[in-house]
Amino acid sequence: MRRNKGQVLLFVFFLLAVVSFLVGALSTIWEAKVKVGALQKKGITAFYLAQAGVERAKYELKNNWNWTGILEASKVSLGDGFYWVELANRDDTSPAVYREVTVTGHGQIGDINKTISVRLRVDIGVPNSYSQVNLSWVEN
């Protein structure tokens, strides 16, 4: 009878060791999943901030073709992050009916950055008329 008690005690210690190992492994896996989820959330938020920059450019350009964008040093705070807008390849030689420009919106939250570039066409003199040039949307 005494020998059985010793075996039961060894079995309980073995079982505790196995359970402890499994709990430790699962907590490590869960911690990694939580970190990945947080990074994904920041990435999506940075993407939306970059998109906000593009939308801001659409608004500003339809009202003032000479708008120069928002420099990184003057970035706009929105929620937990920032956005800024660069304008490039401004086409002032097209007919006076429309003008094209490449808009690059940057979004940043913490150390995560996202960039969206798109070529926009603004119809001069027509209220609320801007469009995206086909196949010009690029995400980085």
Image (spheres, rainbow, N blue to C red):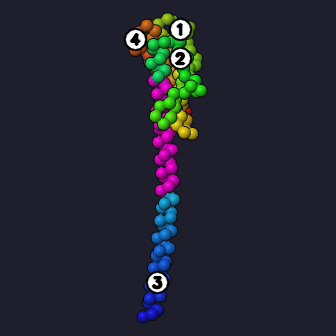
Q: With 89 as the anchor, is 26 left or right in this view?
A: left
Q: Quadrant of the N terminus?
A: bottom left
Q: Quadrant of the C terminus?
A: top right
* In contact (CB < 8 Å): disc 2 and disc 3: no
Q: Label 2, on which residue?
A: 101
Which callout, 3 or 1, points to the residue nearer the camera? 3
Labels 4 and 3: the sequence-earlier one? 3
Which callout, 4 or 1, points to the residue nearer the camera? 4
Residue 43 locus on image (x, y percent) = 50, 39
Q: Residues within 10 Å of mark 2 (few under 14, many from 20)?
A: many
Q: Label 4, on which residue?
A: 127
Give the spatial CA distance, label 2 vs label 3: 77 Å
* In contact (CB < 8 Å): disc 4 and disc 3: no
Amino acid tagged 2: Val
* Residue 46 within the segment the image draws in magenta: yes
Can the viewer see residue 37 in this picture? yes
Badge 3 marks a residue whose secondary structure is helix
